[in-house]
Image (cartoon, coloured by chain):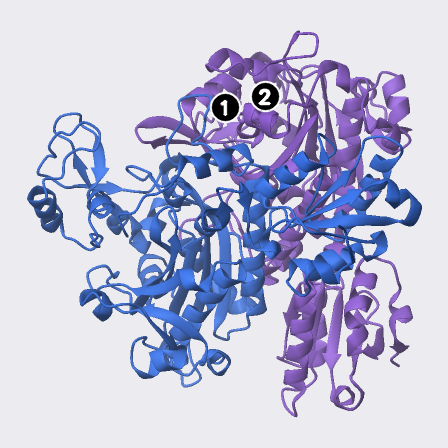
Chain colours: A purple, B blue
Amino acid sequence: MTSEDNFSEELEAHLTRNGFIWGPEPEIYDSLAGFYTYGPMGKLLKNKLEDKMSRVFKQEKFYEVEAPIIMPEEVWDASGHLETFVDPMVLCSECEGSYRADKLIEEDYDVVADGFSDEELLEFIDDQDITCPSCGGEFEQDIHDYNLMMETRVAGRESYSRPETATTTYLPFKRYWRFFRKKLPIKVFQIGKAFRNEISPRQHVLRGREFTQAEGQIFVTEEMKHDWDGYDRIRDEEVRLWSAEEQEKEGSPVTMSLEEAVDSGEVTSEGYAWSLYLAWELFRSVGIPEDRMRFREHQEDEKAHYAEDAWDLEVELDSFGWTECCGVHDRGDYDLSQHTEHSPEDLSFKDNHGKEVMPHILEIAFGTDRPTFALLDIFFDEEEERLQIPTHVAPVDVAVFPLVTKDGLPDIAEEVYRQLHERRFDVEYDDSGSIGKRYARQDAKGTALCVTVDYDTKEDDTVTLRERDTSDQVRLNIEDLDGAVQTYLYGDAELRELGEPVE
Amino acid sequence: MTSEDNFSEELEAHLTRNGFIWGPEPEIYDSLAGFYTYGPMGKLLKNKLEDKMSRVFKQEKFYEVEAPIIMPEEVWDASGHLETFVDPMVLCSECEGSYRADKLIEEDYDVVADGFSDEELLEFIDDQDITCPSCGGEFEQDIHDYNLMMETRVAGRESYSRPETATTTYLPFKRYWRFFRKKLPIKVFQIGKAFRNEISPRQHVLRGREFTQAEGQIFVTEEMKHDWDGYDRIRDEEVRLWSAEEQEKEGSPVTMSLEEAVDSGEVTSEGYAWSLYLAWELFRSVGIPEDRMRFREHQEDEKAHYAEDAWDLEVELDSFGWTECCGVHDRGDYDLSQHTEHSPEDLSFKDNHGKEVMPHILEIAFGTDRPTFALLDIFFDEEEERLQIPTHVAPVDVAVFPLVTKDGLPDIAEEVYRQLHERRFDVEYDDSGSIGKRYARQDAKGTALCVTVDYDTKEDDTVTLRERDTSDQVRLNIEDLDGAVQTYLYGDAELRELGEPVE
């Protein structure tokens, strides 16, 4: 979206050293751009995000499903992916390097080239004398269509890994229809892997070839969108909207209530406004600061031809500026109509008046790699080498140390570890090096709290509890620890309220 | 493994109707054998299993990682998968149908054909006059090697989807080595998708082409295996072992303590015995009955050439008899030696005496589809159409109903729903049809408890709590509900201890 790229070596080194993200893999061979491993800390963080986001969906009575990643060709033909899931590629006439034309432009110029026609792309490259980033050569005057899906053969049939979860979530519609007892809206979500053979993967895990997609899909009727069940609850919620019109005249995003957005015609329906709210809530729930979030409306030439309304939730990253992290789409009846046309099944239903109705779909589509990266990017304090991530999404909730590895302290510390583990906290045990070093290591990983078992523990069953950002400590009884940790992580108490201050 | 196949239409229909498992997908097109969708109930159940199993791993201080599914060819060349991950295939001389030779034999005869040579396979087929299951034709006198990996091209490079997670977990060994501060054992696990282009997928989700693998990997030294840190804690635990010798002489599995197994030489090391214990515990923790579990030792010709010790955990299913669900392998130093040989990196380390040490690997390898299916298979009561699954793994912990959809009861029920959701239970809300029908629907899904909000609730803040298997009910106060549900699910109280009995 923007031309910023401040992804620092310090941040990348920090993520590698502290077990967040490794790659591109396979590192020990010749690595393949766009494939990463989440190490122990990265995986804890990513799990936490996916768990919190699942809970937001479930709170709104969405049900999770898990569909296959690989589907045969006819599915992708029907969904339109075979024809339209292509990127415009240009080749260097000298080194034969291939580049995605629109991204090549967007990386250096502050324009949205996503919707450019082939002619417009070539013209822009020509006008601005854009040359090959690798050898400086001129580009061929030709745009190649490059399909992003990864192909494989299964049982002799041409098949593809899904490039997003959407289609695989739509196919069992008739199964949902019966399971949910023939009543709309039907709300389902899916979190799972998707694959895109990006021409030139960039920006770390932000544009990987293998990534985790998370998509909420709501099957509705056209009428329902304009008289939405949960609308009253969210109409007064405020979001930041940057309309296509404001973008055109280089204006700024405007904060407004969802009701204002509906009434002024900025967004097309109550149901769509509710979907925007849900996207906002999903990102806010994992600790993305609201002042780093905005919705940007798709311009006419960006929008899929079937999209009735389309806005992207963007997050402002230190490394890459404003970055698309979620798309909210009113897909109309496009998808189920396509599958009705291409398959032997009719996915419409008869309403109470005997009228045939083809369900529409409202979609909240995002990945979990980007918000995971966003938290690391936003909350890394380079000077202190500390990850000041909100405590409710800290990869490790609480670390447990015995002061020394003798005199029975490790046994007590192990017992504290087990007790916290059983209460479902993410706990780490560390007994190596000085206490100071152990604190520093936990600060680097973003661990919210550290518990130290010392000689006093043997006397009076108390331990110290230390918070990350201030290094302040309190002393409290082991039996109060579960409750104290829980209260602290969710911001319901300050550290000093949880025990006796330690000087 | 055995020739049983009693997978009933009733069970399959039950799983479809109640939103557990749908497929093979894409159902509305021409479906591809071996690909399934977990519907809303199936996904809740599978998540629950994966969550419990993760917690067993974490309790033992394993860390989770997430590595790419797709890796380039040189990785699979080094790991040995390109050469050895092949199935013996026979072709029908009449209809040209292709079949996996060993499974063809095992399905009708009670032998382990897994380790047969090509000649032995052809001889057995010939001797027993085995013909094509589809057309009755004779098979060609030829075994074809059929590689199971799904191939794709990424950035012009030949690549494959992983057929198991193992290799992708091993590759970052040097990263672990630094992150875990150069100290073995290092314990990691990975849960994620894997793909095998099975020649003829059978037995529902038990042998799918796309499936979820879950593998614990422990990097150790040779010496460590024989002086294992956690051995004291598990030496007295009993498991059922069916040794290669007993299998040979058609004897039975023997229940013995792990210490007896080590001392008698049945298993090769303390570390390996601990790995067996962990596998046993993983399956027990999700509610697989112990009397349906046994370890079966690999016979010499089944064992991978590098395997120092190999036993399978088998579970007895009503549908398919004894079924391999987990493999526990001492892989020696095979894997890291191979990657040291094929990559530019040396994955050995120098010990305190300056000696070069190549780490060994102990592996607990299983999938989560099989235990998920196992619970559905074992606990489905066909007559009552009730899923009598252990309450701590019930897909829905508790369902909430308003008695009627008026007089403010739905608002109270919604509030109870929210309260239980916030306490992290899996909750379902249902307000459609008679209470009797709603109970029956929940019984079919295996829901542990049902809460009904009725007119008394408005008077005294009490609700009814009903248990699945007896239909018994008690009345209790809404504010005691969280604690009551928690206690009940984990078997720490009987229903009648939780409130006043309802006649």
Q: Give the Cα separation between the discs numbered 1 and 2.
A: 10 Å
Q: Position of residue A232 (x, y in %)?
A: 88, 28
Of the numbered discs 1 and 2, the one sitting upstream in the chain is 1
Residue type (three-letter) at the residue carrying disc 1: Val
Viewer-side residue, A229 vs B73: A229
- Label 1 close to label 2 by CB (< 8 Å): yes
Badge 2 local density, few (<14 within 10 Å), some, or many (20+)? Answer: some
Is residue A61 toward the left or the right of residue B307 in the image? right
Which image quadrant for residue A466? bottom right
Q: Is residue A107 above or below residue A496?
A: above
On the question of residue A388 being in view, the answer is no
Q: Position of residue B246 (x, y in %)?
A: 23, 69
Viewer-side residue, B119 vs A430: B119
Name the outermost residue toward the front.
Answer: B503
Viewer-side residue, A331 vs A97: A331
Pointer 2 chain: A
Badge 2 element = helix
Marking on residue B305: none
Q: Position of residue A221 (x, y in %)?
A: 70, 17
Q: Quadrant of the N terminus of chain A?
A: top right
On the question of residue B133 being in view, the answer is yes
